[in-house]
Each structure stands twice: as structure tokens, then as C-alpha cells.
Image: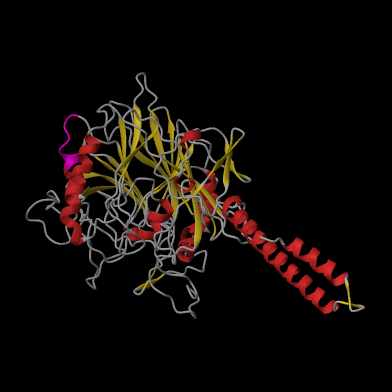
Amino acid sequence: MTSPSDSTERFLSRALERRSGRFEPYWEWLLHLLIVCVRIAVVVAILAALGTYFYHCITLQCVLPDDAIKTAKATDKEPENRARSSGARANNVQENDVQYVWVQLMPDQDTTNTPGGRLVRTIGPEGGRCPTITQGGNSLRMYQRPPSAERAFRILLCERVLIDNGEARVGAVTLPARADEPNDIVVIGDTGCRMVYWQIQPCRLADGWPFARVADSALKQVTGKSFILHVGDFHYREDPCIDSSIDCGMSPFGDNWDTWKAEFFEPASKLLQAAPWVIMRGNHEDCARAGAGWIFLFALPGQYETASACDSNAQMYQLNIGATQEERSRRRTLVVMDTSDEKNEHNYKANCERYESLWTQIGALKSDGEVWFALHQPLWGRVMKGEPQLGTKMEENDEDHTSGCAKDSKPGDSPLAVFRDKFAAAKNKPRARLVLAGDTHAFQFFWPRTALTPIQIIAGNGGTKLDKLYQTTPEGKTLLGPDRKPMLDQEPPAVTPRTSVGIDGNNLTLVQFGFTVMRRSGTTWSATQYDREGKTMAVCQFSEALSATSSDLTNCNDILTRDPPSN
């Protein structure tokens, strides 16, 4: 085959030969030269295209199918079922364009209660690159967690599990360490702004929806020994608000990123970085509401087994949260449950069976350990009037509190009765010391007189519209006024006797926005309720000593004696 250079040489030789005393016309020489240039240009274009391809698809890792499912096991033993790696597109979004960073506590690794490390997550713009974690002089790659509903969540969510509890950073953000002995635990819940067809909360006004102020006040209570427990119910903006409304006009709504950003990530952005989180799922994050968003943003690796956009069949998990300070130290374990689907009548029997199964797992915990039980809905307490709903069956004077799996159960009954019955059936020793819950939009501290029923703290006053408190008898019967309507309780907050679902005890209820901080001194825990400004409103105590019962050393003596705030 003749090369282009040979053809050009022969042509130039012929062009310079004399034929009949004349040179061959120059136009023929120019034509051949043009053809050669075109051929060279085509070759250069092909080489440039190949170079561009290799640059984008190798340097920027756009097609690495094997690497897309790699994990960080070689460096920090991260579980191998990680999401596919972050693929960078050819755009101007940079790796350091991270908008939100937070850490979640991972479940214990095995039955020995070995702490499971930290799950690091970041959110950045869609189409960007996952950042790296700097730890111990190493750069650890994060991996994309793809959304199940991409149109609703056009963001880049990245994650990586760190087993090593040493200092680590994402860009300029220092990641909070997991405390070996957490003694300053912040409890918050029910934080979203209510926006439904039958009730509107002033989401645009700080006084009407004070979650940002609550989060800022809680930030001041965080120490190096803290973790933050959110007991669920983030998402309340379910229905549209008319644009002209001064309360909520132009607000996003529905299960999508814009709403989640407004409801939680933006007002809690500083608190997110302050300490590790335990993030629970409330009934507002069930599959009929905002379950897909919660699972995408907060579900732990392996917590849900299906690949669907939303799932209600979550695994229970446990967290090592230190040990008691006694002559013979005992492990303290936080058991975290997903009861978001509790009110689903269609899954009533299935939930009964699932709760029975979960209780069997709780029974496998060491009998001499200290157990805290966390679920969204409370098991006892003073009933309050908020959103109309079926479900929890927590009426104080309700005598029909048999197992939720009983054959004669009625629609509207709650499978949570399974847990109440199991606690009531305990012999010799209570199965848990403490229950942490939300759902009721107030602060409550309930301690029973029986030694076998746990103490319960309700921390559902993080920002959503508060429930109303009505006057009742000690047995729980609501008192009616002359107009036959329930009478609001206007008395200053105080400890009162209370019977709840057949359990006698004492109860303190505060109808105010705020949060709770739990601090330990020796074997005594203090649960301090702060208002939205960070002022102390009440301090309740209980003992975790092995010999202590629910009524031993339990009190709420330090209560601010003034009328409840009007919020």
C-alpha cells in the first residue's frame, strides 16, 4: 500500500518536469496537497476523540464496573454490600462541593457488644464526585448511595463506614468520634413543620416553627461524650400550601429532597456535624408518607432487605452505649426498633408477629445487662389531643389491653400491646430500665410504681405543632366543661399520679418546644428538659443500679413553676 508521503513525492517530481517547454499546472499539485492535509486532519481528529474518551472514562472513572461495587474492607473492614461507587460526570461540580456531613452510629458487630463503628454520610450536588475521608494520613474513598426515586432526590449522597474511631475529616469538617462512655445524650423528636389539609403551622416564622432555634440550643449542650437520638417524625409537609399564605406560602411539600432539606437538613446543619446520631423512623416516615426518603437518607446498611423504594420490615438493632459504674460493671445497650408502620391496619397481624419475633431477640440479651428500649410510639403516659389518628391505644382508663395478636383484636388496635404485655409478664427483673419515645408532641416523664415496668421519656416536642393537654382524673378520664367540651389544663406543670394502660405511676408533662439531655453521675441519670432557648425547665432522675427499681431514687423535683408557654 502506497503511503501519503510517497504519493506526494512522486507528484512533486512530476510537477517539476518540463513537458513541451511548460511546467505541469500548479492547480493539480495544490489539489493533491489538499487531499493529503484532509487525510492527516482525519487521523488527528480520531486520535483526539480517543484521548478524550480515555480521559473521561479512566481518569474520572465513569466506566469501572468492578470498582463500582468495591468496598473499603481492605482499609477499614467495611461490610462488602456497599452501594455502587460515585461516578463523576464531565461537569464543573467538584469533589469538595459538600453541603451536609453527618455521622450515624453503626450497630454492634456481634453478640459481644463490640461497637460497630461510624457511618459517615455526605450530601452534595447531583453529578458531582464523592469526597474522600482523611484518616491517619490515608485518603479513604466514599461511595455513592443511589436513590430509589432519582427524580425526587437529585442529589449525590455518599457514604463510608469507619471502624477506626480515630480522628477523621471530610474536607475541613472534623468527624465526631464515637464516645466509649456517652454521658451527655441529646434526645429530640417530632421536629417537622405541620402542613396538611386540615392544619397549617407557620413554617416561615421562627416562633411558629422553632426547630432551628431548638437545634441551635441543643448544640450548646453537646460534648465529646455525646450522641444525638432523634426519635422520629421529621416530615410533616405533606400537602401543598397556597402561595399567598404568610405562614407557609411557597413551601415545598411531599417526599422529595426540597422538603427534606427544608424540614431537617437546613435547620439542623450545625447540629448534624456536632456528634454522632442515632436516627429513628416515625409514623410520618411510613411508606404512605415519607418512607422512601427516610430509607434513602438514613437507613443503615443492611437494615432493610428488599430493593423496593420503601419497606416497613426493618431489622431491630442494638448499640453499645457504655457500661454502668458499679463494683461489677454491666453493659448498657440501646435497642432500636422501627415501629413506623404500627398504625397500618392492613399489616396489623403481620406487625403483631414481627413484634413478637423482635421481642425474642431482645430476650437473647444478657439478663444482667442494662437495657434501654427506643421506639417511636410511647407505651404509657398521659394521653394528649393532637392529630386525629388510630393506633396506639394508650388511653389511661383502657382496661382492654390484651396482646395485640389476640384473636378478638379490632381494627384500630395497636400491636404495641405486644411489648406492654411482655414487660408486664417479666419475672424477678425488668426487661428494660428505660423506654425512649416520641409521637406525643410534648415532654413527658413517666415512672411506674411496679418494679417490672420501665421508666419512659417522651421527647416529641422538637418543633412540630404541640398537642393540647386536657384536664383529667388520675384514672385518665377527660373532664368536660359546661359546654360539654374537654377543658384545657391551664395549671402549672407538676408531677401527678397517673394510671396508663393499667400501670399505676407518676407523670410530669410539659407542653413546650424543647429537647432533653441525659447526663450520668455514678449510677444516677438526670433527664433535663430544656426549652427552645436552652433554659432548664425540669430535671428528672432515675438510678441504673442493679438493685434499683423504677421507683427508687426516681423524681422530678426541679420543675420551673410557672404557667406553660403558650406555644
Between 59 and 72, the one nearer to me in the picture: 59
Q: Is residue 199 visible?
A: yes
- Residue 307 is left or right of residue 364, and the answer is right
- Residue 100 is left or right of residue 316, and the answer is right
Between 289 and 438, the one nearer to me in the picture: 289
Give the image location of residue 256, x and y in percent.
43, 65
- Residue 387 is left or right of residue 227, and the answer is left
Name the outermost residue toward the left: 408
Q: How many marks can you see?
A: 0
At a point 49% along the width and 81% down the height, the residue shown is 244
Rendered position, 494 above or below 152: above
Q: Is residue 163 visible?
A: no
Give the image location of residue 70, x and y in percent.
46, 43
Task: Locate the C terminus and report the quarter of the image it occupies.
Answer: bottom left
At a point 92% along the width and 78% down the height, the residue shown is 21
Give the image location of residue 536, x and y in percent.
48, 47
Rendered position, 314 above or below 452: below
At a point 20% along the width and 56% down the height, the residue shown is 393
Give the image location of residue 324, x and y in percent.
37, 27
Assess whether residue 423 is covered by the magenta stretch: yes
Between 356 and 98, the one nearer to me in the picture: 98
Instruction: Give the magenta range.
Output: 422-428
Query: Which image quarter: residue 385?
Result: bottom left
